[in-house]
Image (tube, grey):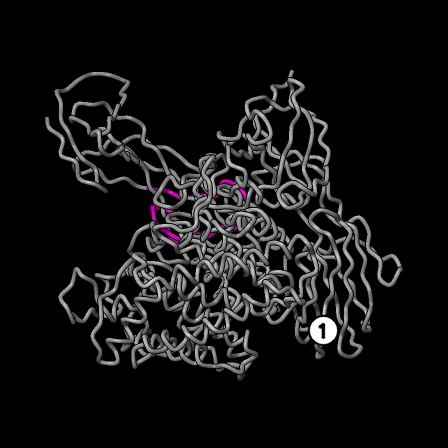
Amino acid sequence: AGLDIVKDQYNMTFFGEIKTDKLRIEIDSNERFSTGILEWKVYDSGNSPDFPPVAIAGPDRVVVVGSETFLHGSGKALARPGDAPSGIWSKQSGPGEVTFANDHGLNTTATFAQPGDYVLQLTYAHRKLSATDALNVRVVQKPAGPNLVSVYTTPYKISSPFWKARLKSNIVNWIPHCVRMNDQPDLKEGGINNLIEAGNKLAGRPYKRHIGYPFSNAWVLNTVEAMAVALNVDAEGDAEILSAQDDFRRKLDEWIPIILAAQEPDGYFQTRYTLGTVREPMDAKIPHWNARYRGEHEGYVAGYFIEAGIAHYLATGGKDRRLYDASIKLADCWYDNIGPAPKQAWWDGHQEMEQALVRLGRFINDTDAPGKGQKYIDLAKFLLDCRGGGETYDQSHVPVVQQYEAVGHSVRAAYSYSAMSDIAIETGDPAYWSATLSLWDNLINRKYYVTGGIGSGETSEGFGGDYSLGHNSYCESCSNCGNLYFQHKLNLGTRQAKYASLFETILYNAILGDLDLPGKNFTYTNALDSDDARYPWHVCPCCVGNIPRTLLMLPTWMYAKSPDGLYVNLFAGSTVNVGPVAGTDVEVVQTTDYPWSGDVAIVINPRESKRFTVYIRSPQREVSTLYSAAPDSDGITSINVNGETVSAKPDENGYVAIARTWQPGDRIELVLPIKVQVIRTIEQVPANRGRVALRFGPLIYNLESADQNLDPTIGQNPTLTPQWSPDLLGGVMMISGTFSNGAELKAIPNYARLNRGGRSIVWIREEAAK
């Protein structure tokens, strides 16, 4: 029979009854569009014999002791009228007792008496036949406090040539380019033009309607934040940086009044709603927080407004509160309208407001009065708790505390998981911790690229199934930023160094590689096998300001604090005032050529002598169980303080702890083992079978067709040598060696890829073992 095609649902066709034990489906495009079949099924004519069903226990997960885990079992079988599948849950193994709320139901909960590894089994019965599936559960204790706190990005110096070049290209070239693009009066994607028109309307003047995506205010706000953060970088006399920073000050003075004029009287902000679009009648009033418009990114834009306000406040030392006060007004607008009855329930189609509200609440608690910002943190939790009954695409399919698998759009997911980490930290809620740690486990151990990127792109800008890590990866630049935020929050909440090791990988590879070396072009996606040149703009320029605002917050990623300790997470030549530690302000000066060298010197300059602990991250190159590397390059080779050797053995959290009364000028010297490593992937990842990748320190390496033929294989135990090449790609440590056929092999860092044209690959074919 004929087949009518309707998207996002099963489409049926019929044919005469046949008898076969094999079926194959072939699908052709209609000559204009490719097919997008995710799943197909065969319906029973009624005369088929019973076939065993398939049981689906659900994703493996992590559970905090004292928290219930939500079990949603299901199965697949040939269905007939009147069928009533059933499920039985049981414990197969584990060190303690497991209590099921109802062990004879597909949907139930379980709790665990003690930590350890457990296996639960679902028996799915369909008519007279049944099948089983196992679910692995790792039960852990809830992270113990106190959690760490972020170091705010305030004025800092960079002495590292590596980072100087990267930050300068952002400040001198990329951010000014973003400003120029947003300033175009006819920018079809929507820039400052939308805000000018919103101001016109609110002032009673003639106006034009919103153009571009509903979330187009985002790239203006991200660019504002990037300019503000860039003002914190000490130019140290560099004329180009000084000139760019002067331009930023002038542009902020120009743009901020435009932004404030576009904010509605009650504090609400989004020009798509203020102006309406050409699809709607002139002066049509679009209701705020309406489920019909859930995908219009109200919270996404509002969250970026808040973060820009905080960044500008910090950049001016609190002397200019205009944008910051407006961000508080915006947050108050949401708080006055969204919340438990009689207020309105709401969740946004694109997460961002949630983590921005927590950032604002913490900032107010720190800078104004403890507890004063709590209402914004409470609102962030409410927004997360409202999710459910929607789609996997925006992580609204089930309540967030019942989510254990990374699914849907990867940027939305990363922002959601980052905010969930915030709420787990703030509330200590074991259900939030269970879901957050489960999502981390699924993401990092099943869906994480070796470069730190996430999102294979098999679903719309999102994740594929477990271990589906094809080289034609999507890895959107915004998702790279979101993944860094997620790992940073978990480092704060657990005090475990492994999360900092992950965000080091993300920063050096996934994010640094988003821009070309001059800082004049970017890439929206980051494939691990590509010949795509970067470009100056994109039809959806959501990443253009997100990249520099993230990179320039280097002090926030470098350091964290506890009440009596300073945590050193990244190594970069710099001078940073981290604020108070144990009651006194502390300046930290790092001198190092990392990542090219493992020699690091850290000078601690407290304003007055104080006893506290300095915790230095002991690098762990393999956090994800997807990858293993040889030779070993973990840990710290040696440490001394003022010339006296101290133990380099890390504690249970992965930090080397040095407790003493610190005097100004106390000097820590350490050596990190930086070696060329060969990386292999577990067998479950089909894309990487028979292939290897290369790493040097935190840097993943690529082979490029500009240097060699990419087809030969590499030997099982290749001789690979780091070689400093000052004239190559701005100065890089190249890895040199030979292919199996004797041809010369050259590898360059992933962040520097595709600056010379041609093709670039991460995974290299390996010669088969003999």
In front of the other: 201 or 148: 201
Q: In this view, does 523 lie to the left or right of 652?
A: left
In front of the other: 620 or 183: 183
* Quarter where residue 551 is shown: bottom right
Question: Which residue appears at 66% of the width and 52% of the height?
Answer: 162
**Residue underneath mark 1:** 586
Q: Residues within 10 Å of mark 1 (few under 14, many from 20)?
A: many
Please identify the residue farthest to the right as the structure is shown: 644
Q: In this view, does 713 lie to the left or right of 9?
A: right
Taking 190 as reference, is 476 above or below it? above
- Whole-percent x and y of residue 253? 45, 76
* Quarter where residue 589 is shown: bottom right
- Whole-percent x and y of residue 644? 89, 60
Taking 622 as reference, is 553 above or below it? below
Q: What element carries label 1?
A: strand
- Whole-percent x and y of residue 321? 47, 81
Q: In this view, does 88 lie to the left or right of 426?
A: left
Please count the marks in the image.
Answer: 1
Highlighted range, magenta: 87-109
